[in-house]
Each structure stands twice: as structure tokens, then as C-alpha cells.
Image (cartoon, rainbow, N blue to C red):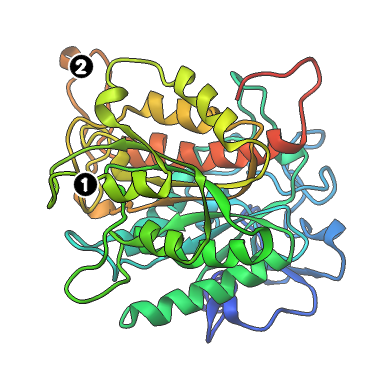
Amino acid sequence: MRPLLWAACSQLLPRGAGLCAPKLAGTTVVTSSHHSLQPSTLLATSSSPASASAGFLQPPVPGSRAPSCWSSGFNVPPSAQLVARPAGVCSMMKLPVQASAEGLDVAFVGVPLDTGTSNRPGARFGPRQIRAESAMLRRFHGSTGAAPFDSLRVADIGDVNVNLYNLPGSCRLIRRSYQRIVASGCVPLTLGGDHTITYPILQALAEKHGPVGLVHVDAHTDTGAGALGEKIYHGSTFRRCAQEGLLDCARVVQIGIRGSSYEPDPHKYSREQGFRVVLAEECWMKSLEPLMREVRVQLGDKPMYISFDIDGLDPAYAPGTGTPEIAGLTPAQALEIIRGCKGLNIVGCDLVEVAPMYDVSGESEDASEQGKCWHRQLWVKAVGCTQMSSFFCLVFFRQYSPSGGKPTL
């Protein structure tokens, strides 16, 4: 068992420098579907992208649609009807794990960094918890018609090996890692990590795409000049990005902004740059579909990025974060925002500031009081994981439309 665990862990985070490690000669995959697991079937190596899903084993039931190298050319989440959810490697959606983004259309990437937080730490554990809860996600989405696993090659490529004791150094590691991801032609979907990580990610993306548009969901604008003498932290991310020309400022929208401030006009910097700031009060008790129609027009068809801070949601739904602010968005509004980005030229997405330890787990509220049971970790399971799944669907709808019409995402 110990050699098997070591082999799996060494692929999730390559020894030495994580995603910065030299690329392997072939594509290395760790299977997340464990039927009659044997050492010889744990790892599969190929020299061509077409066989990158070879880590999947044959379905145990003849004729079933279980993911396997024989029945599908793409990586798909294993069905819980055939594979127990607690079984297998803890990857995003229980997908295979690769050592690099080579041969992929989309990659899930973890950045376990919270050195830039100003209040409660803990976002370094966000990627791990999102992956654990994502075992609930399934292959198809009935209400949207999305079936991205049938068209896009996707895998979990592990975590960036950040330096928890050096924030600027970690930013350099993140930037170099994403330069490799972007160079492969892959769209990165990032599990954070505090909001500092978006800065080096956008540095890497802007090198390829030029200044990008941005849909930024957050309780805070994150445009501070600095704190405690430091210019880089999670509250200064988008000021640094604007100053370095990473953003197409006329195509930046910040949604859900609220809370107290250090200055009488806390949104002045954003407006001066040309950002559109949508306060949380403008979103209360209404659908955000009309807003997102305007946003789609504003962003056009040029490259854009989505950055979603979990504290954009009201802490009634998302208490597990470092800087919660009351009177925020609802999960339904969050999905309206993400689905409202359908058709845009998305070059990357992130979900940040997920700090699991502040969300009490293992309890449910009385059904007679609430009308239904709400698991205390609803935010990370139904909100955080659903957001990451929806990001993946956005990339799918950017390139494909399922037969039988154009469903709304």
C-alpha cells in the first residue's frame, strides 16, 4: 500500500517543484477509478494525447457507460453507480491526474497559498477540500444540456508548489507554472488559495493574450495600494494588475461589492480605471440575467477571465472564508453570473478564498424549520464545486453546442 500511495502522491505534486518540474516524456496519468487495483494498472504512460485516458480501467459491467480507455477518448468522472465515491485518488471530480497540461483542453490546478490574507487564514486548504467534495459532481447537466466531458480533454494537474514563507517568491512560482500551462494551449481552471494568486496568473495569461477583460465577483474591489508596507497581498491584486497593463480596463466588471471601508469613496480607484462596479445593493432581491446581458456586450469577443471570490456570496451560504461580509449574493445569483458568461472568450477562471475550517461540518438544520435540510458544507459542495463545474461548461459552450438547439448554460 505504501508504494501505491507514494506513486499517487508523486504524480499529484511532482517532487521538487510541483508544476515547475521538468515535463515527462509522455503523459502520465493516475487513475481515479479503482476496480481490483493492481500496481501495474495504477499508472499509465503514453506518447500521444489520444491515449491520455488510458489510466481508466475497463468497466466492471459489460456494455455499461462507465469511463474507460476502451469506451471513451476523453477523461470522464466515474459513475458512483459503479465506483464508490470514497474510493480512488482525491482529484477534482475524481478525474485522472497528470503531471502537466500537455494534450489537455482544460486543466484543474490547485494553488494552496494563503500568505496574502489580511484577516483569517486557511485558504491554503481550499483546493484540497474542493477536490474532496467534488466527488458529488456527475458527467452530465440535465437542465443546461452541457456534456463537456464528451468534447474536451480535461484532467487534474495537481498543485503549484508554492513557498508559504515568501509571498513574492510564490507569485514567481505561480507565474512560471501558468506560463507552461498557457503555452500548451490549455485553459486553466484554478482552485485557490487567497486572491493574491490571480495577480501572477493574469501576468502569465497577458503574456499570450494581451490585456484581458475581467468578470470579478467579490465583496471587495481588491484595489488597495498596499498594507503594512507591502504592495502584494490579497487586497491589492487588481491595482497591481491595472498598473502592469494586464487588464483591458474598459472591459472589467466587479460584482457584489459591499461592506465598510477605510475611505469615504472606496470605489474611486476602480471607477478611475474604467471598471464597472456593481454594488451588492444593486443585486438584492432580483435576477442578475439583465445585468449579465449588459456584461456580455461590454466584454465582447476578446479574451476575458473570471475571478470568483467565495466571499462574494452571503456568509449565510459561504461562511468558510477569511473576510466574510453580510448581505451578499445568493448561490442562484452566482450561477446566473457564471452562466451569463456563456459565449465569451474565456481564457481562464479561478475560485478563491475558500477556507474550509470556518464552515462547521457534520450537521444539518432541522427540516421542519427550514423546509429542507442544508448540510453545513453546502457552500463548498453545492456552491464551490458547482462553480468549478460551471466554469468547465463555459469552456465547452465556447466551442460546442449540443445537438438539438442552443440551451442556456
**Mark 2 vs 1: CB contact within 8 A:** no
Q: Which comes before the other along the chain, label 2 or label 1?
A: 1
* Residue 394 image offset from top left, x and y in percent: 62, 37
Q: CA distance from mark 2 to mark 1?
A: 37 Å
Q: Is residue 99 visible?
A: no
Crowding around mark 1 (Cα neighbors within 10 Å: few <14, some 14 to 19, many 20+) is some
Quadrant where the image shows the C terminus? top right
Report the amino acid beneath label 2. Gln
* Residue 85 image offset from top left, x and y in percent: 50, 44
Q: Which mark is residue 367?
A: none
Q: Which mark is residue 370?
A: 2
Q: Is residue 56 above or below residue 394?
A: below
Occupied quadrant, residue 259: top left
Q: Is residue 2 above or below residue 55?
A: below
Mark 1, residue position: 266
Residue at 77% of width from left, 15% of height from top? 405
Residue at 78% of width from left, 40% of height from top? 151
Closer to us: 302 or 124: 302
